Amino acid sequence: MELFNRALLRVCLGAIPIVGIGWILAVTDYFGVALTFQQALGVILGLACAAALLRYPYFSRPGIFEAVLAVTGFLTWFWMSYNFEDWIVTAHERTPDKWVPGAIALFLLMEGLRKSAGKIIAGLVWVLIIYAFFGNYLPGVLEAEVFPPTKTLTYYYADNNGVPGLVLQVVVNLVLAFIIFGKLMEVSGGTAFLNDLAMGFMGHRRGGPAKVAVIASSAFGTISGSTVANIMSTGIVTIPLMKRTGFRNEYAGAIEAVASNGGQIAPPVMGATAFIIAEFLEIPYQDVVIAAAVPAAVYFFVLFLQVDAVARRFGIKGLPREELPVVRTVLRSGWVFILPIIVLLYFLFWLGYNPGLSALYSGASLIVLMTVRDRRPPTLEHWRNFIFGSGEILVPLLLIAGAAGIILGVLNSTGLAFQLSLILTAIGKSNGILVMLFLTSLICIVLGMGMPTATVYIVLVSVIGPALVNMGLVPIGAHLFLFYFGLISMLTPPVAIASMVAAEMAGGDMWKTGLIGVQLAATAYLLPYLWAFNPALLLEGSLVQVIYAVVSAGAAGLLLAHSVTVFARGGRFGWLFGAGMYAACLVVGSSTIWLGPDSPLALVVAAAGCATVYAVLRFTSDAEASEA
């Protein structure tokens, strides 16, 4: 039985990327078989559900019970796919052949979610499901409009506003393709190439391996589509090197987690979320990339400075040059990994192809280039690692996307989404937009716990986006605000999935790693508030406004980077000067708001901030030297 379950698991894992690729390439159309996207989603979700139930058994080994659950999970979702076209016509009929398998399918989806993604996110979804059935007993604004149970089950199971809806469609059409491309890069050696290239450039500098983590993780993260996958790919190299040169376990894990998570805010791909933002806003994809460029640059600028300051504080030097790869040699052997990225950008920017299709074409070009370079096709082992590895990554993502469909279904069917939007708008009008933004950021972090970036963005923008735009935020600013706070939920305790994974790899304490990660990612918590009040940071404004906003943000970032380090030193001056520099960071960063976006005094304030950094660092260094 164990051999059967293992074989069944591999079939499910292998079929997920294969079926996904077939759907994106519209293979069925060549055979004259027309499918709706809900039918394809049902098959892929059924495979993911079955794989999760087999991959995480109730006991030490999967037995007949897991096999029965897995087969049932697949068949119930396949049943929806098989009947979906007929059910569209008979949507008003809620017969047992719809809601009975629907109840089983939804329960097994939630069980697979609990096993593969954790109890916290599953618990959150269960609370909303209970609310969908019993929310009419709650008082005030939380009172829900509750449908009959059969209608509710059928709605979530077989309606394009439920599980087989927008979130799952985006994950299959976009994120799946970039996960596959990222996995192909990893299996073929592309991740190692990026690490070696960064190591050749930065490995010999102070805190070199940590700076390598920042560069390599951001480069790979922009195309990987998954923070956790990024950590697992690049962290396996960078974390041991950071620990070897003197970084504490918690710092090594936190730096990798923050860098990997930040890869998804880095243009041009932004983990595929940039395409989704463009689709929601109905603007060209290039506009999203341009708007996100300056905040991403500030984020990595500050992170790089913080890493350098931490290395200086602990006296961590770089690696000897003789141990580092030679950049010229790395480029000579790894040129095949640069060309597919150029191909990706060519299809996206020049030809304007569908992003998922562009990612698959880029992956195909990598296979061809590898064959040319090695003078033989990829080995069977390469294909196994690529196909089954992609399936492993996609299983929790697909189940979370299915659960997100339930969340959206609950929010829409009960009226909770409309109520939340009204509440936030009322708070903004009565208490000011700053209070509204603060509450919005908290909601984003809570709803984003454990969710992939694209998934949480879709949920947030559907629920909260209209309220932000109604309060006067420019649309791109509102969407990027939700995107950033949904993303940093991966770093924010108590869940902090990214920090948890990185801490486990580094052998550090999860809580300490999470708190250090919050410090290192402080820029991401502050920047959205800045562009909410001054969209010039997103290049929305005149040239003068943009220059003032960028300079102010850069100077504030300099203060922020060194405030954390000075504060962490403790001692006689550390606490005082650290807090003072943080306050100065807020003053400098917001200067274009309280002085006005066109005021040249913002440059004076920025210059004063930079002078403050120099003076404090000089003073604290002299003080430490005298004490020594």
Image (cartoon, rainbow, N blue to C red):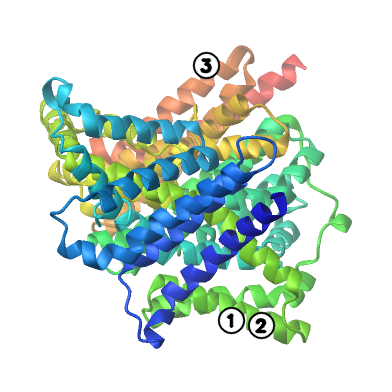
The reply to whether discs 2 and 1 touch (Cβ–Cβ < 8 Å) is yes
Residue at the image position 15 percent from the left and 44 percent from the top? 472
Residue at the image position 54 percent from the left and 39 percent from the top? 115
**Left or right: 614, with 380 as reference point:** left
Residue 567 appears in view: yes
**Left or right: 125, with 337 as reference point:** left
CA gap between label 1 and label 3 equals 56 Å
Residue at the image position 54 percent from the left and 43 percent from the top? 116
| SS category of the residue bearing label 2 | helix
Q: Where is residue 258 shown, x and y percent of the image? A: 55, 42
Q: Which residue is mark 1?
A: 365
**Left or right: 536, with 125 as reference point:** left
Question: Which callout, 2 or 3, points to the residue nearer the camera?
Answer: 2
- For marks 1 and 3, the one nearer the N-term is 1
CA gap between label 2 and label 1 equals 6 Å
Question: Which callout, 1 or 3, points to the residue nearer the camera?
Answer: 1
Q: Residues within 10 Å of mark 3 (few under 14, many from 20)?
A: some
Q: Which residue is mark 3?
A: 576
Q: Which residue is mark 2?
A: 369
Residue 420 occupies which quadrant of the picture?
Answer: top left
**Taking 30 as reference, is 383 above or below it?**
above
Q: Residues within 10 Å of mark 1 (few under 14, many from 20)?
A: some
Q: Amino acid at mark 1?
A: Ser
